[in-house]
Image: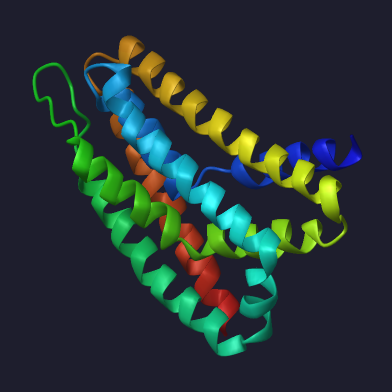
Amino acid sequence: MESILHGIILAFGLILPLGVQNVFVFSQGATQPKIARALPAAITAGFCDTLLILLAVFGVSVIVLQFEWLRLALMVVGILFLLYMGYAIWKSEPATAETDKALAVRQQIIFALSVSLLNPHAILDTVGVIGTSALKYTGLEQIFFTIACIFVSWIWFFGLTAAGRMMKKLDGKGKLMNAFNKCSALFIWGTAFYLMIGLT
């Protein structure tokens, strides 16, 4: 029971802050014409998080944390990616009933893969925090801990999609979504600069 509770609290703590992955999943809920059309982004993000959690629990954290050059390479690639994503989100126009610029399924999957697997902040958090926390448990307790982390991740992404859908209903003109995109871009750039400072 302790391992399940620990996994739930830890996963929520890592996933709650606004980040590139959360912004993208939320925006799909807000821009797609139907909530079912936004599910590819949420499902892809859920699968990516599941993969990262499983890799972290089963020892990749030890490898990444052991080699400084690997951590630095991951950070540099991720910083460049975050700078680009911030620019793309800043320039994007929210889809409305008039413009209908919702992403196709394939584009959603590609974007969700990139924001999930090219985000150093998410990877280092998952690998460093969940991976090292999992070392506290063995056997069945470790399995319960892992399942709890994965469960929280999936529930969160489906919840974000629903929240985005609710915003669309309240924001037919796209004004709120436009402000949200601008704030998200600033946050993403801030994350990139924060990671840059960590490199010095």
Going 14% across and 16% down the picture, which residue do you hit? 97
Residue shown at the point (62%, 41%) measured from the top left? 150
Front-most of 71 and 143? 143
Q: Is residue 125 left or right of residue 195?
A: right
Residue 179 visible? The answer is no
Residue 121 spot, x, y in % from top left: 54, 61
* Residue most extreme to the front: 139
Instruction: Check the image and name the residue furthest to the right.
Output: 2
- Quadrant for the N terminus, please: top right
Query: Along the horizontal axis of the image, is 160 left or right of 85?
Result: right
Task: Name the colouring of the figure.
Answer: rainbow
| In this view, 59 is above or below 164 | below
Residue sticking out furthest to the left: 98
- Count of labels in the image: 0
* 23 shown above or below 59: above
Question: Horizontal and vertical percent for residue 107?
Answer: 21, 44
| Residue situated in front as seen by the camera: 95 or 28 | 28
Residue ranking furthest to the top: 169
- Closer-to-camera residue (139/23): 139
Q: Is residue 52 left or right of residue 178?
A: right
Quarter of the figure with residue 59: bottom right
The percent position of residue 6, horizontal first and vertical second, equals 83, 42
In the picture, which quadrant includes the C terminus?
Answer: bottom right
- Residue 182 position within the rendered picture, expressed as x and y whole percent measured from the top left: 34, 42
Q: Residue at x 21, y 18 (%)?
A: 33
At 80% from the left and 58% from the top, the residue drawn is 133
Q: 16 or 193, which is in the foreground? A: 16
